[in-house]
Image: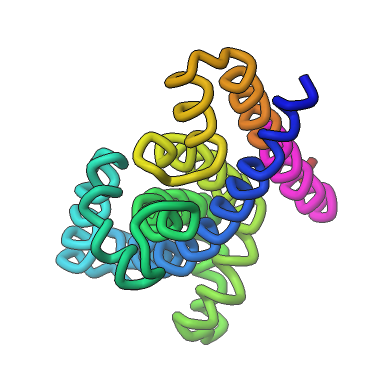
Amino acid sequence: MVETLQMLVEPTLSTIYMVAISTVFSLILGFPFGVVLCVTSKGHLMPMATLNNVLGRTVNVLRSFPFIILMILVFPLSRLIVGTSIGTAAAIVPLSIAAAPFVARIIESALREVDPDLILAAKAIGSTNIQIIFKVILPEAYPALINGITLAIINIIGYSAMAGAIGGGGLGDLAICYGYQRFRLDIMTGAVLVIMIIVELVQSLGSKIANDVLKRRGLS
């Protein structure tokens, strides 16, 4: 039991690190696309059918790409950026790229929940499009954005576990290399339980923050 717990410590920390950094980069990549997808859609702030259609199809194609295949294809990029294609640091590159289109759709969906009347009111008082985006749409969508980002983090946790199948490090790697291949059911079970705990903590924290925002607004 003690040996199993000791073996879980480092992979758990690696998974948390991998997920945290990948979340940051996926938000940097996906957030702007989500905003553009929303505001350029038909009937929204800056409707641009061609741009929205091209960007939407690109995001859909990237979202449908199997993560394992994407990780293999991105190996050269990982080697170029971090100097290796194996391990936790290398896995961050494909994790970020794989999660970015998912983040884009989540952000788009969250922003679409903003009441159109608020946007019209902001236009009526002479606000610019940039002001409306940053002072009306994004603040109003804050609870939905938090819930969406929480879902994205959970998705990245799932991707990180799959990354272990091809040397991505973390709990997925531990479960496969030591649990499955060496028939250590205790290690495999421990790794799965830790992943489940991390997911539950992330979901609980995200829901609490979103609910607190709604309470401050008197909506919950």
Q: Is residue 164 above or below residue 80?
A: above
Residue 200 placement (x, y as % from top left): 69, 32
Q: Is residue 182 visible?
A: yes
Estimate the x, y position of residue 212 in percent, counting from the top left.
81, 49
Q: Is residue 195 left or right of residue 44?
A: right
Q: Is residue 193 left or right of residue 93?
A: right
Queried whether the magenta region covers residue 216, the answer comes back as yes
Q: Using the image as rendered, state which of residue 49 and residue 189 is in the foreground.
A: 189
Specify start and end residues of the magenta stretch as a single range.
200-218
Q: Can residue 108 be seen in this snapshot? A: no
User: Which is nearer the eye, 181 or 36?
Assistant: 181
**In the shown orientation, is residue 112 left or right of residue 144?**
left
- Colouring: rainbow
Residue shown at 83%/48% (left/top)?
A: 215
Q: Report which quarter residue 194 is drawn in.
A: top right
x and y percent of residue 136 in the render? 59, 70
The picture places residue 19, in percent across and down from the top left corner, at 56, 51
How many numbered marks are there? 0
On the picture, is 61 further left or further right than 136? left
Q: Decide whether the magenta segment is chiefly helix, strand or loop.
A: helix
Which residue: 18% across, 58% down? 53
Tell me what residue is drawn at x 45 percent, y 80 percent.
129
Foreground pick, 212 / 85: 85
User: Where 121 sits versus 22, above or below?
Assistant: below
Report the residue at 19% width, 64% height from top.
49
- Looking at the rendered image, the quarter that the C terminus falls into is top right
Residue 93: image quadrant is bottom left
Q: Is residue 170 magenta?
A: no
Q: State which quarter of the image contains the N terminus.
A: top right
